[in-house]
Amino acid sequence: MESDKIYDYDIEREREKFPILRRTVNGRPLVYLDNTATTQTPREVVDAVVDMYYDKKANVHRGVHTLSQEATNAMEATRSLVREFINAGSTEEIIFTRGTTESINLVASSYGQLLDDGDEIILTVMEHHSNIVPWQLLRSRKNIKIKVVPINERGELDLDVYRSLFTDRTRLVSVAHVSNVLGTVNPVREMIAYAHSRGAVVLVDGAQAIAHLRVDVTDLDADFYVFSSHKMYGPTGVGILYGRRSLLEAMPPYQGGGEMIGHVSFTGTTWAALPYKFEAGTPDFVDAAALAKAIEYIRSLGVERIAAHEDRLLDYTTAELLAIPGMRIFGTAPHKSAIISFLIGEATPFDTGMLLDQLGIAVRTGHHCAQPLMESLGIEGTVRASFALYNTFDEADRFIAAVRRVAAMLT
Ligand code: PMP
């Protein structure tokens, strides 16, 4: 496999942009393979945060003064860039939230009010808790039914079952673009087309897709598409909800407060136009502004090139890990993103993760906020390694060697 260890960008130059990658952990150079939980942040994004605090901090949308206008312009520039990045029709369809979780809660509580008792929604067994619990909260307020699409042995959704779950009462489907445990890239375009043919709308949870795949909401024909800045090399505390304009217009506000109103009086209040109707209160304008730098950064390398790099790391590492006795990998779909969930023999994920940490390797262990998926796999949890644009084959080799060592100790 040596011949496959190629880079088609200057990886060392990219790594230098991420100061954290130079640190040591437990006396060893850090190998950061917890990118599914959050990606690291390049200097230019952090500089943009600092620049907002040092040079442009003023509350947005309210002021005529220069600083307020500059801060507003910076945040609105990000909105335009996000629109372009995901190929949405208009900036009015791009709403700033706190993250994927809040974006889904927004849709569940607001769009949810348009559902009637007896209506049905479809989720999948591989969803993150943040794409399950908001719908259960809705179910506790309205008498809706939740149906669940199962997976096959490779960790792919069973599309026959998916189609068979629809009835005349199906109003919404909510599905991950990429599973945060299995890495499976779901056929969301096909699933959306089918849902539309049955009169249902579709929310796509793009948390694990946005930094790893080309996302085009117009081509997908998605009704809602949600993601978090911190998983795409951006600052924490910001996320995006893309929503189809006609749906957002029909939906009631999510929270009330400043910014989201047209006119307030004690006899009746009117709402602001999109997208502000869904942005009550002072937004995290500092981090929203800096998100633009993260998008520019991804675009400077190109998401396809990033994906190709991560795929090479995935293929190489998977083949090497499978040679370790007792190795079980969960999620073997041909179309998968660079996430490897595994168990070695009877070793607990916790023990494996602790030993890897001693060797400077950061992986995630546990149920990964996907307990229904764990239950369907008949396990408590896994060890999960996931790659990003700055990971190297040298790091993959150190990880593989460490897993071999741990396997020899624990099995
Ligand atoms: N959905 C998926 C598929 C995820 O991987 C995550 C984060 N692990 C989330 C939703 C939640 O994202 P956040 O915590 O940024 O809101």
Image: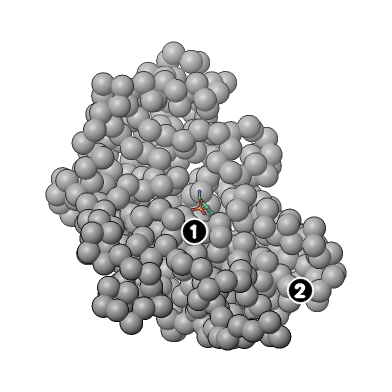
The residue that mark 2 highlights is 115
Disc 1 marks which residue? Answer: 99
Q: Secondary structure at mark 2?
A: loop
Task: State the residue at coordinates (46%, 62%).
Answer: 239
Name the residue type under label 1: Gly
Classify mark 1 as within 8 Å of ligand 1 or not, answering yes or no: yes
Check the image and tell me how it is coloured: one colour
Q: For numbered disc 1, what is the local secondary structure?
A: loop
Comparing 30 with 240, the one in front is 240
| Quadrant occupied by the N terminus | top left
Q: Residue 129 in the image: x percent, y percent? A: 62, 49
For the residues labelled 2 and 1, the Cα–Cα distance comes to 24 Å
Report x, y in % for residue 339: 44, 45
- Name the amino acid, label 2: Leu
The residue depicted at 80 percent of the width and 62 percent of the height is 141
Q: Residue at x 56, y 81 (%)?
A: 261
Q: Would you identify the image quadrant in which residue 23 lies?
A: top left
Q: Is residue 108 above or below residue 30?
A: below
Q: Which residue is drawn at the image coordinates 32% and 74% (left, top)?
A: 68
As drawn, 301 above or below 36: below
